[in-house]
Image: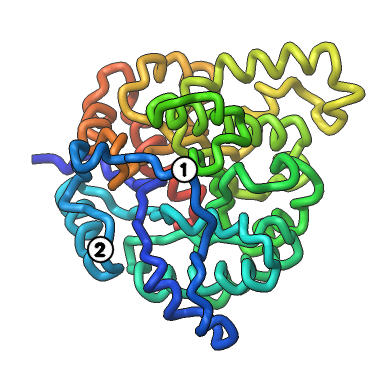
């Protein structure tokens, strides 16, 4: 039997334990027992056990147990490599004490590199993004000394949109080090996007992920990040991809009337600026307009993600559907399932 088209999971997850991160804190914080990241609403995300997590995943597994699960997932589904995003540590950016935030991020990155990284599992780190100089220094340390290939940036808890020059030191460091910036959806502080008006987790989760990511996609594209930093590797993750034609059309409309004053770095309309960039967007399963989206932006901008072990993932069905899709060429499948992620994360 011929081997299935190989895959790289561009957005899997670990459920890191604060107790294990604490093992890597500097001595000055050893006596402190406060939470390592701020809390949010106490939602019943798995409906009190009604929604089972895949592969025997559950909260409380240590790093070794999670690595064992991920190795089994890769073996069972012909996944060559997996990029693993944290589940809680991205929220460390919201810590208001600058020194504590910086050191907690470093402890998390040490933990990920030491306890999760293998020859096919690549955890991404976290950065104190509200202090761009400290974030740039941490990115260089975690890339050069720890071997991390990318960093999760959540869209909430930040002073500006991620296209603002405030963040340029981070992008300069990422471009220099070849590190990836993964802008990842969240519902954690969804009130920043107006989700405080909603009353159920389903409403908040459905709305907040795209609201936060698209807000920052707007900032990144309109402020010309891909033009100012042409070698920067950046992805927008966990909201699907079929919003791209609608939203790029909408940005093009504003460009036509306001570009000279408000998008001065863009010499082409936003849709063409995106097509010319190396920006990537991850797929969700069962996107009915995937063919049309590929025709609009090109397969080279799309990457595959399992989202394991989150409750709303559609793995492994989404992987098999992409491998078997009769409306995609083999070249498009190879690009989406493997090559684009290999390029994005330098693997």
For the point 37% across and 43% down, which residue is it?
Answer: 338
Q: Is residue 147 visible?
A: no
- For disc 1, the neighbor class at 10 Å (few under 14, some 14 to 19, many from 20) is few
Viewer-proximal residue, 277 or 48? 48
Left or right position of 224 against 8: right
Secondary structure of residue under mark 2: loop
Name the residue tied to disc 1: 41
Secondary structure of residue under mark 1: loop
For the point 61% across and 31% down, which residue is it?
Answer: 193
Q: Is residue 48 above or below residue 148?
A: above
For the point 25% across and 57% down, which residue is it?
Answer: 70
Name the residue tied to disc 2: 61
Left or right position of 130 against 296: right
Task: Quarter of the image for the C terminus: give it.
Answer: bottom left
For the point 60% across and 74% down, which residue is it?
Answer: 103
Residue 262 % position (x, y) = 86, 26
Task: Quarter of the image for the N terminus: give it.
Answer: top left
Mark closest to the chain's N terminus, 2 or 1: 1
């Amino acid at each position: 039997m011929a081997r299935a088209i190989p895959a790289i999971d561009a957005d899997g997850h670990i459920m890191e334990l604060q107790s294990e991160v604490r093992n890597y804190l500097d001595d000055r914080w050893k006596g402190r027992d406060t939470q390592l990241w701020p809390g949010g609403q106490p939602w019943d995300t798995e409906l009190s056990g009604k929604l089972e997590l895949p592969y025997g995943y559950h909260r409380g597994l240590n790093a070794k147990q999670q690595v064992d699960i991920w190795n089994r997932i890769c073996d069972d589904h012909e996944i060559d490599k997996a990029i693993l995003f944290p589940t809680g540590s991205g929220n460390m950016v919201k810590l208001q004490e600058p020194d504590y935030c910086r050191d907690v991020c470093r402890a998390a990155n040490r933990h990920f590199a030491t306890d999760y990284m293998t020859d096919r599992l690549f955890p991404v780190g976290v950065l104190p993004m509200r202090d761009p100089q400290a974030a740039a220094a941490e990115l260089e340390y975690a890339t050069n000394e720890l071997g991390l290939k990318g960093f999760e940036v959540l869209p909430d808890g930040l002073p500006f949109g991620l296209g603002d020059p405030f963040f340029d030191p981070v992008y300069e460091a990422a471009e220099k080090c070849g590190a990836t910036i993964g802008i990842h959806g969240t519902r954690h502080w969804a009130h920043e996007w107006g989700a405080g008006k909603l009353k159920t987790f389903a409403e908040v989760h459905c709305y907040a992920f795209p609201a936060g990511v698209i807000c920052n996609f707007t900032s990144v594209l309109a402020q010309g990040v891909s033009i100012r930093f042409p070698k920067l590797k950046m992805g927008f993750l966990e909201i699907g991809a079929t919003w791209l034609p609608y939203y790029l059309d909408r940005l093009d409309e504003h460009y036509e009337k306001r570009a000279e004053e408000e998008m001065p770095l863009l010499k082409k309309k936003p849709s063409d600026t995106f097509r010319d960039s190396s920006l990537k967007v991850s797929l969700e399963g069962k996107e009915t307009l995937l063919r049309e989206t590929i025709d609009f932006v090109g397969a080279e901008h799309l990457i595959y993600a399992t989202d394991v072990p989150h409750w709303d993932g559609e793995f492994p069905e989404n992987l098999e559907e992409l491998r078997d899709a009769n409306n995609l060429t083999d070249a498009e499948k190879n690009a989406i399932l493997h090559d684009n992620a290999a390029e994005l994360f330098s693997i």
